[in-house]
């Protein structure tokens, strides 16, 4: 079977985008892994599948698969590439589109300067929804928000803030992201037994109240150059812990994202807004 694809990237988080608006594209987990493989396939962090929608007020369906073939709920950088794709391909003439993921309705806006702003929805702090099991742990509280000490084995621990942006995140503060042990600690947090569906592990360096640096070891894909939902989760955690103001520039190894959340002034269920780049890299066809 021949598969036509578009390769895209947002702040260096890269995607294979598949158009399933005309016909369904039921790929097996093996086929998804092959597409994502950087040596035997196209290579990407995530595969994004664009589907037609039959729901009133919803323009498209949006399915997301990690490089390991697992289907996930949300992808922030992917959402920006999504709107760039449907506009560039003429699948819509709207510059604000509404898309349905497996658990969220997102509004994506293509701006005049080519960047994209996404209403990422409200963060979720209910631990059962992350899901995270804190049984037997005593949280450390700052400004009323918890951080949990996770035992990682061999005397290692990580103190993480836990929340969901539709997908699960555990954010820890580090002094310097360049020297943070992401390759060692990332997988231990990602697969920690307290996270029943695994978790994205964020490493956050505070530069000032409006500027941070971030690395994320992503569930199902390993460390990526940027993670949009990870940036939202890290900024929301930093705001709740009293470290950050409501608008924050996030520097990742792949580019910069702007994250805004007015949760302390407008209520915890205020939406998080993310703005950043989205680009097409090339198009092609792969035999599966
Ligand atoms: N790169 C993404 C997140 C993709 C999904 C994530 N790995 C998960 O399993 O939840 C982003 O930009 O948000």
Image (tube, grey):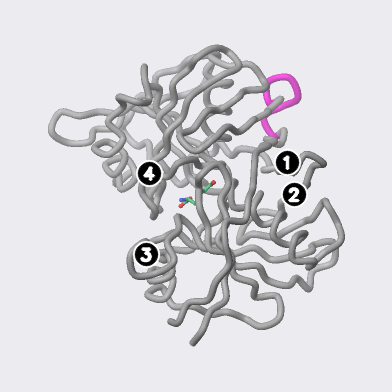
| Discs 3/4, front | 3
**Mark-to-mark CA distance, 1 and 3:** 29 Å
Q: In the figure, 24 relative to 184: above or below?
A: below
Quadrant of the image containing the C terminus: bottom left
**Mark-to-mark CA distance, 2 and 3:** 28 Å
Q: Quadrant of residue 154?
A: top left
Number of other residues with Cα within 10 Å of mark 1, as a class: few under 14, some 14 to 19, many 20 or more: many
Q: Which residue is mark 3?
A: 37
Tell me the magenta residue range: 263-269
Asked if the residues shown at circle 4 and circle 1 are in contact, with their CB atoms under 8 angstroms apart, the answer is no
Checking the image for residue 223, the label placed there is 4
Q: Quadrant of residue 33?
A: bottom left
| Discs 2/3, front | 3
Checking the image for residue 190, the label placed there is none
Kind of element beneath mark 2: strand
Callout count = 4
**Mark-to-mark CA distance, 2 and 4:** 25 Å
Residue 270 screen position, x and y as percent: 72, 33
């Amino acid at each position: 079977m021949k598969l036509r694809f578009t390769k895209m990237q947002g702040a260096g988080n890269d995607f294979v985008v598949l158009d399933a608006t005309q016909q369904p594209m039921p790929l097996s987990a093996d086929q998804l892994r092959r597409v994502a493989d950087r040596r035997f396939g196209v290579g990407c962090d995530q595969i994004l599948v664009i589907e037609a929608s039959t729901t009133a007020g919803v323009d498209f369906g949006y399915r997301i698969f990690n490089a390991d073939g697992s289907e996930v709920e949300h992808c922030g950088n992917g959402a920006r590439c999504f709107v760039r794709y449907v506009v560039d391909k003429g699948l819509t003439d709207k510059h604000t589109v509404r898309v349905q993921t497996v658990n969220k309705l997102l509004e994506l806006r293509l701006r005049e300067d080519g960047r994209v702003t996404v209403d990422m929805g409200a963060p979720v702090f209910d631990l059962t929804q992350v899901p995270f099991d804190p049984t037997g742990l005593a949280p450390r509280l700052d400004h009323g928000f918890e951080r949990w000490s996770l035992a990682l084995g061999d005397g290692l621990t990580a103190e993480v803030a836990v929340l969901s942006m539709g997908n699960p995140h555990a954010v820890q503060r580090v002094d310097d992201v360049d020297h943070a042990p992401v390759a060692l600690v990332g997988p231990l947090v990602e697969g920690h037994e307290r996270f029943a569906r695994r978790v994205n592990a964020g490493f956050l360096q505070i530069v000032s109240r409006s500027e941070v640096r971030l690395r994320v070891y992503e569930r199902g894909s390993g460390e990526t150059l940027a993670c949009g939902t990870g940036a939202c989760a890290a900024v929301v955690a930093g705001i709740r812990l009293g470290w950050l103001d409501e608008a924050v520039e996030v520097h990742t190894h792949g580019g910069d994202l702007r994250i805004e959340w007015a949760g302390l002034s407008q209520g915890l269920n205020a939406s998080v807004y993310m703005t950043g780049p989205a680009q097409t890299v090339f198009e092609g066809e792969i035999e599966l």
